Image (cartoon, rainbow, N blue to C red):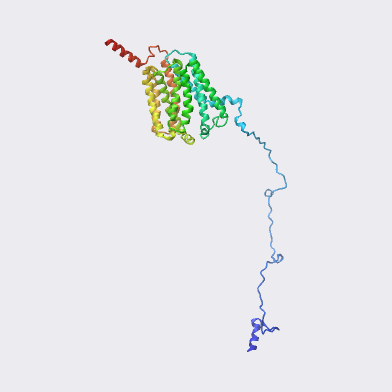
Amino acid sequence: MLSRQILQCPRLGYCASTSQAVFHTNVQNNSLPRVKPLEEEMPAKSFRKTVRSPSDILDLTSSSKKKNIDIIVTDTHLSQWYKMEPKSLASDYLQLCKSKLSMFVASTAACGVLMAPVPVALAPLAACTAGTFLLSSAANACNQLLEAPYDAQMRRTQGRVLVVHRFSPLHAFTFAGVTGMTGISLLAYFGNPLTAALGALNWFIYAGVYTPMKRAHIGCTWAGAVVGAIPPLMGYSAATGYLDPASFCLAAILFSWQFPHFNGLSWNLRGDYSRAGYRVMCVTNERLCRITSIRHSLALLGLCSIAAPLTGLTTMTFAIDSLPVNAYLVYLSYKFYKAPDAKNSRKLFFYSLLHLPLCMLLMGISNYGRNDDEKISISDKMQNAVDKITKYIK
């Protein structure tokens, strides 16, 4: 039995050993070792050399030619913001006082002088025109001084001189004070105290009431209309020394004209006004903006054709001649009311710029050459006729 097992050992891989153990195993591993072959054992491969074009090779040894760029660095010191250039100083002052608007306001004061029922004197006319221009310049400078942070947020006003720091606030304040006091002095010396008081009041309303009110209440437009109505009163009082119903009729015409004019202007600027925080009608109440435009256009029609002849401001000739001028304004206001788009509002605004000069021109033509009897108002003539009839009956 034992010999039979011994014979089977070589077959199973067992062999005799000299050790004390009966059997000794020697297992043969025929698997190859798992190691990385040597390089010389690898089969030879043919590598094809790729040739690059000279343009693909980056040459780091050669120095590249650099272009010479001249960079001019200006002085960025804070004093540069307040540096005044003599060549543009006059233009900057004209922008600060809004010269075109101030000339327009001065022309309405001159219209008040010409419409007064007294002979035209050169000194009151020149003093009133110049004084009103200076006061308007002072008011506009104060307006820009107070609204500079908000003007920077509007595309229409972000190029004003105080926004771009062409003037310091102290410079603008000094300019406003000098022009305002000079204008009041001219009106008081060559005119009368009433005209000077009206000019000072208008300056205060524009700078102290209207400007702050624009960001607080919708009634700012009515305050601005009062500011536009006072210059004709200044001209009328400079010529006569008093105010009467005819002067207030002239002021009422200027008051009502402000609404279609400003509403037509502001309608296309609603985004800017809203961004700057202004509470004007076109932002807070669009329907009221359209209604007031047509309402005051109709008021202008009644003032020019009915009130002006009744108060003796003009004759019936003006009442008839002004009918088509005012009727077209009513038509444009109605179109703006029915279709408040950019086209209609722009038409209304631009026609308002033509409407007021036409009305003032027609007033001057109707008033030219009138004698003292013709300058008496229709209401006074009717009262005189009633007095005569009463006296005759008695």
Q: Residue at x 34, y 14 (%)?
A: 381
Percent of width and height locating residue 351: 44, 26
Residue 347 visible (yes or no): no
- Residue beneath the point at 38% across and 25% down: 299
For the view shown, which residue lies furthest in the right direction? 61
The C terminus is located in which quarter? top left
Is 314 placed left or right of 19 in the picture? left
Q: Position of residue 131 (x, y in %)?
A: 50, 20
Q: Position of residue 271 (x, y in %)?
A: 47, 36
Q: Looking at the rendering, in which quadrant would you find the N terminus?
A: bottom right
Place residue 366 in its image quadrant. Answer: top left
Residue 197 appearing in the image: yes
Residue at the image point whose x is 47% and y is 24% from the top: 202
With respect to residue 338, does 28 lie above or below? Answer: below
Q: Give the side of residue 58 with respect to residue 87, left or right.
A: right
Q: Quadrant of residue 10?
A: bottom right
Q: How many marks?
A: 0
Image coordinates for residue 100, horizontal then vertical, percent:
51, 24
Front residue of 85 and 339: 85
